[in-house]
Image (cartoon, rainbow, N blue to C red):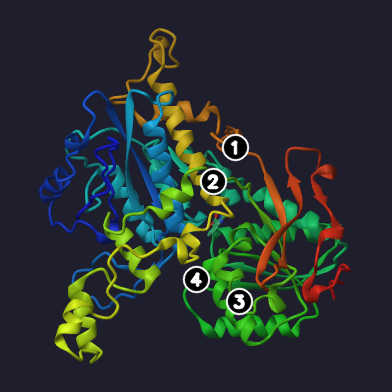
């Protein structure tokens, strides 16, 4: 696997390893040799030590379908469905590392390196990546680690809650810290089950309470619910239902969005929505799982409903930028985590080098719908019978790009920095690990937290030692000045409440109409400005629930 994510000038130590592209080797020794390819010393600032942070992001939306027959040895599947939003998160991790490595006041004597895995939105890939990370093996062999590479610090990831639940169980066994930017499921609150799990996104316990409060606030008595078929959807909606039912609200239907494509199931859900008298529908799902439903709703022109959005789809361009979405989803109200502006991030995203690694290449080719490889472009031209004059084609086959295309002109979700929310969580997660490492490195011998006042050694610390520093961390995030600390691994529950309104060009804007603050007494938590809401079909009055 080729990894060129290295900028020796800035003396960054960047190791980029994406499992779907990587490293097929048959025995542990070959693996060790392969590992030696990333021999980091060539890029290392000799004065500085290096610590590696792991990252895991759902850069692709699914596994490519695989052959299920058992006549051949099974292979790790390929991934497909490139996700521009999650690729922005990935690049934000790299940006934060670059920023930290350039600082002289945070980890001045240590460089951060990284290794990143694509979890492909699937549990099996996330587990595979975790084992690879822990063992240093391209073929994931537990309890085996070759060479004395730089110490691994923490894993930032893995993606949705179902993935993190799987990886946290493995990492917990080794007391290895995991810092999640996106996994919000309430079951991840349990330190008994997941002893080394921390996150920069609030637990959905807060969101379910907030949603229930919202329903009661408007006096709605009938609601329909739709949840993704994963831990996020199931637990989020379960808690919401418990709370509203306790308060006397009835649920007229509860549907589940399938994880694997099933047009029949989606059509059935749309028929339920159409057949029900409930006009308020709560959806707890990621945008990826919600999208097929939205397409079917548009097809059936399902209007005159008020949709309540969970955080995972409320600011999703994949949904809100759909053509003609407003008649169906206009007036949607949803919860969003804190937003930030991150100076320098947009420039970083715009300056991405398409030839840096296989992922940036794929990003470029998907974004511009072209190929960077001359050979591939030639082959495509031949296959589509487009070869007219051999010379023309030789000079400029159709669909070939040169890596100099203008990213800024594309209006792509990747470079859209107007809604940095999960992106900001990623940024905070990287800073949290960096601050913990800084504190570990600057421990004063004799006054340290470990046995007899001893300290950990940044060159060869144990994962549980870093865990100590993460648990007891308090730091201020650059630029936003937000103070971060973890209470039993969790952060405070705070959400902005957004309303989907029409912008001047007929697209969607997310208009803030209030917020939910989980840290104040229950009756003061929800603040909503009813008058600033525009409901479905442009009405200004609160809709009835039936
Ligand atoms: N927690 C969800 C997944 C998720 C998500 C998102 C996915 C959240 N926010 C934004 C895509 C985009 C919140 C989970 O599974 O825990």
Q: Residue at x 20, y 72 (%)?
A: 374
Instruction: Say above or below: 307 vs 351.
Output: below
Report the residue marked by disc 4. Answer: 259
Assess whether mark 1 and mark 2 are in contact (beta carbons under 8 angstroms).
Answer: yes
Label 3 to label 4, Cα distance in Å?
Answer: 15 Å
For marks 3 and 4, give the one nearer the viewer.
3
For marks 2 and 3, give the one nearer the viewer.
2
Query: Quick one: label 3, few (<14), some, or many (20+) residues within 10 Å?
Result: many
Report the residue marked by disc 1. Answer: 480
Label 1 to label 3, Cα distance in Å?
Answer: 34 Å
Label 2 to label 4, Cα distance in Å?
Answer: 27 Å
Q: Residue at x 40, y 7 (%)?
A: 446
- Precedes in sequence: disc 1 or disc 4: 4
Quadrant hosting residue 319: bottom right
Where does the image place residue 318, in percent across and percent down from the top left?
A: 54, 69
For marks 2 and 4, give the one nearer the viewer.
2
- Precedes in sequence: disc 2 or disc 1: 2
For marks 1 and 3, give the one nearer the viewer.
1
- Precedes in sequence: disc 1 or disc 3: 3
Label 2 to label 3, Cα distance in Å?
Answer: 27 Å
Report the residue marked by disc 3. Answer: 294
Mark sitting on residue 490: none
Report the residue marked by disc 2. Answer: 424
Q: Residue at x 32, y 65 (%)?
A: 362
> Relative to residue 433, is residue 285 drawn left or right?
right
Assess whether mark 3 and mark 1 are in contact (beta carbons under 8 angstroms).
Answer: no
Assess whether mark 4 and mark 3 are in contact (beta carbons under 8 angstroms).
Answer: no
Where does the image place residue 403, in percent across and percent down from the top left?
A: 30, 63
């Amino acid at each position: 696997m080729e990894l060129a994510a290295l900028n020796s000038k800035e003396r960054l130590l960047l190791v980029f390893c994406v499992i779907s592209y990587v490293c097929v080797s048959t025995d542990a020794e070959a693996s060790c040799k392969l590992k030696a390819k990333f021999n980091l010393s060539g890029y290392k600032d000799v004065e500085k030590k290096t610590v590696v942070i792991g990252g895991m992001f759902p850069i692709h939306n699914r596994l490519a379908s695989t052959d299920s027959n058992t006549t051949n040895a099974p292979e790790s599947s390929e991934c497909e469905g490139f996700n521009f939003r999650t690729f922005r998160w990935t690049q934000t991790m790299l940006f934060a590392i670059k920023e930290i490595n350039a600082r002289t006041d945070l980890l001045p004597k240590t460089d951060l390196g990284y290794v990143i895995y694509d979890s492909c939105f699937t549990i099996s890939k996330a587990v595979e990546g975790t084992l690879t990370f822990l063992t240093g093996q391209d073929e994931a062999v537990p309890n085996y680690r070759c060479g004395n590479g730089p110490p691994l610090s923490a894993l930032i990831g893995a993606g949705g809650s179902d993935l993190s639940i799987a990886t946290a169980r493995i990492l917990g066994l080794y007391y290895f810290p995991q810092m999640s930017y996106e996994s919000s499921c309430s079951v991840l609150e349990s330190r008994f089950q997941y002893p080394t799990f921390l996150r920069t996104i609030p637990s959905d316990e807060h969101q379910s309470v907030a949603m229930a409060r919202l329903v009661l606030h408007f006096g709605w008595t009938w609601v329909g619910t739709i949840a993704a078929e994963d831990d996020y959807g199931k637990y989020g909606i379960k808690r919401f239902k418990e709370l509203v039912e306790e308060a006397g609200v009835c649920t007229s239907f509860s549907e589940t969005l399938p994880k694997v494509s099933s047009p029949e199931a989606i059509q059935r859900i749309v028929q339920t929505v159409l057949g029900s008298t409930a006009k308020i529908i709560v959806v707890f799902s990621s945008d990826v799982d919600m999208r097929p439903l939205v397409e079917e709703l548009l097809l059936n022109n399902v209007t005159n409903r008020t949709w309540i959005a969970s955080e995972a789809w409320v600011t999703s361009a994949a949904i809100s930028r759909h053509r003609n979405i407003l008649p169906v989803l206009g007036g949607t109200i949803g919860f969003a985590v804190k937003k930030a502006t991150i100076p320098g991030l947009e420039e970083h995203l715009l300056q991405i080098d398409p030839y840096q690694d296989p992922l940036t290449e794929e990003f470029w080719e998907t974004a511009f719908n072209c190929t960077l490889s001359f050979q591939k472009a030639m082959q495509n031209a031949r296959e589509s019978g487009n070869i007219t004059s051999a010379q023309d084609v030789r000079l400029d086959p159709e669909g070939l790009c040169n890596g100099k295309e203008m990213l800024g002109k594309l209006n792509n979700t990747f470079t859209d920095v107007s809604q940095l929310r999960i992106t900001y969580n990623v940024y905070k997660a990287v800073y949290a690990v960096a601050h913990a490492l800084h504190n570990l490195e600057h421990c004063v011998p004799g006054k340290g937290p470990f046995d007899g006042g001893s300290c950990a050694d940044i060159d060869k610390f144990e994962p549980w030692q870093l865990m100590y520093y993460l648990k007891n961390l308090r730091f201020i995030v650059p630029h936003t000045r937000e103070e971060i600390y973890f209470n039993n691994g969790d952060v405070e529950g705070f959400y902005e409440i957004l309303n989907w309104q029409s912008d001047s060009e007929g697209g969607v804007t997310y208009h803030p109409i209030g917020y939910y603050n989980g840290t104040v007494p229950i009756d003061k938590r929800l603040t909503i400005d009813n008058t600033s809401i525009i409901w479905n079909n442009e009405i200004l009055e609160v809709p009835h629930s039936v």
